[in-house]
Amino acid sequence: MTQVIPPIHRQADASHYEELVTRLDELTRQGLTDPEIAEQLTAEGFHTARRLAVTVGTIHKLRKNHGQVSSLHRHRKVSMIDGFWTLPGLTRELGVG
């Protein structure tokens, strides 16, 4: 059977929008990357207003609109995580770059 999805002009008008945002936050806390999150959300049946899949671009827009920060950006200025150097932290420590 073919599924017909009515046209939606804004992502916030899509069905299950709040569930999508909540799930994005959960997957981010689990440490998934944005491409992994987009793939997982698509596999779970979420879609954007204009596509049958969730794209990395959509993830970025949702983060911006809801003040969320990706794991990558959250750790960008951190020197160490759980006793291990981050690349930016080690670069600063060694004075290179």
Image: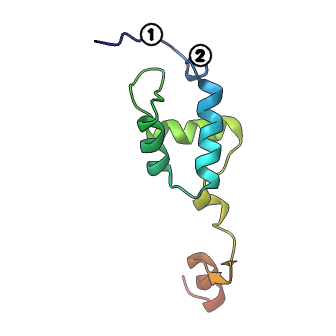
Which residue is at a point 58% across and 32% down the rendered structure image?
20
Q: Position of residue 75 (x, y in %)?
A: 65, 66
Question: With respect to residue 52, does 34 lie above or below?
Answer: below
User: Looking at the image, is 91 positioned above or below residue 51?
Assistant: below
Residue ID at (68%, 84%): 83
Q: How many marks?
A: 2
Q: Give the crowd class for mark 2: few <14, some 14-19, many >=20 residues within 10 Å.
A: few
Q: Position of residue 40 (x, y in %)?
A: 46, 43
Extreme-left residue of the structure: 1
Q: Amino acid at mark 1?
A: Pro
Residue occupied by mark 2: 13
| Placement of the C terminus among the 4 image quadrants | bottom right
Residue under label 1, please give it: 7
Q: In front: 19, or 97?
A: 19
User: Disc 2 residue type?
Assistant: Asp
Marked residue nearer the N-terminal end (1 or 2)? 1
